[in-house]
Amino acid sequence: MARVVLKGICKGALSASGYRGPALALSGELSCLHLTQQTTAEYHSVSGAKHARKDRLRQESKSGTQTETQCKFRGVNVLREPKFNKGTAFTLKERQIMGIHGLLPPVVFTQDEQVARVLANVRNWDEPLEQYIYLNGLQDRNEKLFYRLVSDNIEEMAPILYTPTVGQACQKYGFIFRKPRGLFITINDLGHVYDILCNFPEHNIKAVVVTDGERILGLGDLGAFGMGIPVGKLSLYTAMGGIPPQQCLPVVLDVGTDNEKLLTSRNYIGLRHKRVRGQRYDDLIEEFLEAVVRRYGQNTLIQFEDFANHNAFRLLEKYQNKYLTFNDDIQGTASVAVAGVIAAMRITKTKLSENKYLFFGAGEAAIGIAKLLMMAMEEEGVSPEEAREKIWMVDSRGLLTVGRPSGGISKEKLQFAKDYKHMPSLEDICREIKPSVAIGAAGQGGRFTEQFIKDMGSFNERPIIFALSNPTSLAECTAEAAYVHTEGRAVFASGSPFDPVSLNDQVFYPGQGNNAYIFPGVALGTIVAGVHHVTDDMFLIASKVLAGLVTDADLAEGRVYPPLSTIREVSTQLATKIVEYAYDNDMAATYPEPDDKESFVRQHQYSTEYESFVPEIYSWPGVVE
Ligand SMILES: NC(=O)C1=CN([C@@H]2O[C@H](COP(=O)(O)OP(=O)(O)OC[C@H]3O[C@@H](n4cnc5c(N)ncnc54)[C@H](OP(=O)(O)O)[C@@H]3O)[C@@H](O)[C@H]2O)C=CC1
Ligand SMILES: CC(=O)C(=O)O
Ligand SMILES: [Mg+2]
């Protein structure tokens, strides 16, 4: 059996310089030591002894830039492992070397040809949910092809993998469940959470998205079915932000559900009891966070997603300075909405502080937006009191007022409560306040009625109307309604995508005011810089960068966000600014500080290009194939 010490192993991936890795058997027991091209994608921040060892190993190798992945798969297992499988794109030589010759049809396709085929397949399905299932299957078979398809066709794929279809997928998660993805950690696992994390096959996790499933989009408590959300968000981490999929971990914390329909459904896949609340719930959260840090290091980003209001705010307050964590529904949403408003100011030619804001909804999204708006207004030079005065909020009981007759008011709401008469009707409030900006985030579909929109149009030359609730069915109004009832004068954005609207020979392109414009970039920036915690400043920076990327041509078409097709570049720019901010403010733990932050960010991004599995030895002089 021929054994060689390889200098370079992966054709095209390694220069032949200086590698002193393990010997590679070239005969029957071939184990392919595969060095990926995510060269500097390992972080120098401390993330456990194991990773420190890897870092040392890497520094010792002269190239100093190679990540190594021990690929123990050969034979049919190569085809079964989505991160290595190339399907019909394996070359003849690779098929022979890896013992898969004959297991595939003889044709060898390029990745481009494969993309054309899978795209046609997606389009062949009539129903978005069928397309979702097909895409999940592809992700489970051939990860690079999946991400290439999604990244190259993001405007078409995002509504399938994300809102609105992901909402439908969550509602039917038990029915469409094929193969597990991520970790299901239950309240019964208290005391053993770390052990469960150790069961996850990937070891270099940098980003966790976690939900307890209690407020999935605007669809309410979906319990363990909520897993579709972390899975979908993390697909966007990769497709939109370029964070490698092997560094991403979706988690559902299953503490039960209060959704009676699910509790009695045969298809329900979670714990069949009411939600556990109180101390045991808090213990699970605490143990989970500690276990993540113990397993993957302090600089692991943990995104809280779709927790119910009563937990979201208090958990954010409790943990935001202790862990590298943020709440996407509060902070990510705030950032994208404020970006949209900043961009819209170029249309209305006003300052933020010259506007009056009416929020329909006073929950995570609305309060988060209002607080960030205040920060942005204060940067314009107004006092906190003056900024606060501009903000009016409506919840399920009507206008937020200090003197509410019963039930009190939460501390988050109190800061925006007005000393004003009780007013229950949104339309009446709108007519009384005469806002220039209306932001819907109440999960109550259609509540921006024709009258409401017309009223907004009567007070303002260019009314700003954001219907941010998800999924589409819960949007406060459609794009068409916003444009039609204002004769095309509305500046409109929505949380879920709407098609362009033609009106009087003009086409309007509604913006998608969704936190997906923010979380992939902010996550990428915080991870690569190795920051200890995420600050509100970072979200305001992200707002300003995002708004700055909106061109005059975008605005002329009615867009207050850059086209989604540019999202990878948007995320890269966001991440670059976050990295710059982190170094400028002594928050970065990744050393040495890179001179060129943008290329530093780009070096960490995932490539969907297939790599060769042909050991470089085959190109050495004198080696007979
Ligand atoms: N576009 C985006 O990126 C995002 C969109 N969202 C969407 O925003 C919506 C709300 O999410 P979130 O803020 O987290 O949820 P919360 O549960 O925290 O807040 C919902 C708010 O809506 C209010 N509300 C409910 N029913 C009514 C009603 N009939 N009239 C007036 N107000 C009402 C609630 O009032 P009360 O306080 O009295 O209960 C509460 O203040 C969801 O649809 C979600 O999908 C969320 C995050 C991101
Ligand atoms: C977009 C999002 O995070 C939500 O609707 O909850
Ligand atoms: Mg959410």
Image: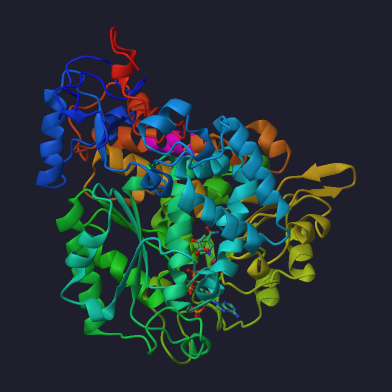
Instruction: Check if residue 573 falls in the magenta segment.
Output: yes
The picture quadrant where one finds residue 599 is top left
Q: Point out residue 516 in the picture as x, y percentages from the top left corner.
A: 50, 51
* Viewer-closest of 297 and 19: 19
> In the drawing, does residue 157 fall left or right of residue 615?
right
Q: Point out residue 51 in the picture as x, y percentages from the top left corner.
A: 15, 42
Against 490, residue 171 (above or below) is below
Instruction: Check if residue 183 falls in the magenta segment.
Output: no
Against 459, residue 173 (above or below) is below
Give the residues in magenta.
569-575
The furthest residue to the front: 1
Q: Which quadrant does the C terminus fall into?
A: top left
> Which SS type dominates the magenta stretch?
helix
> In the drawing, does residue 316 fall left or right of residue 562?
left
Q: Does the image show residue 543?
A: no
* Viewer-closest of 112 and 214: 112
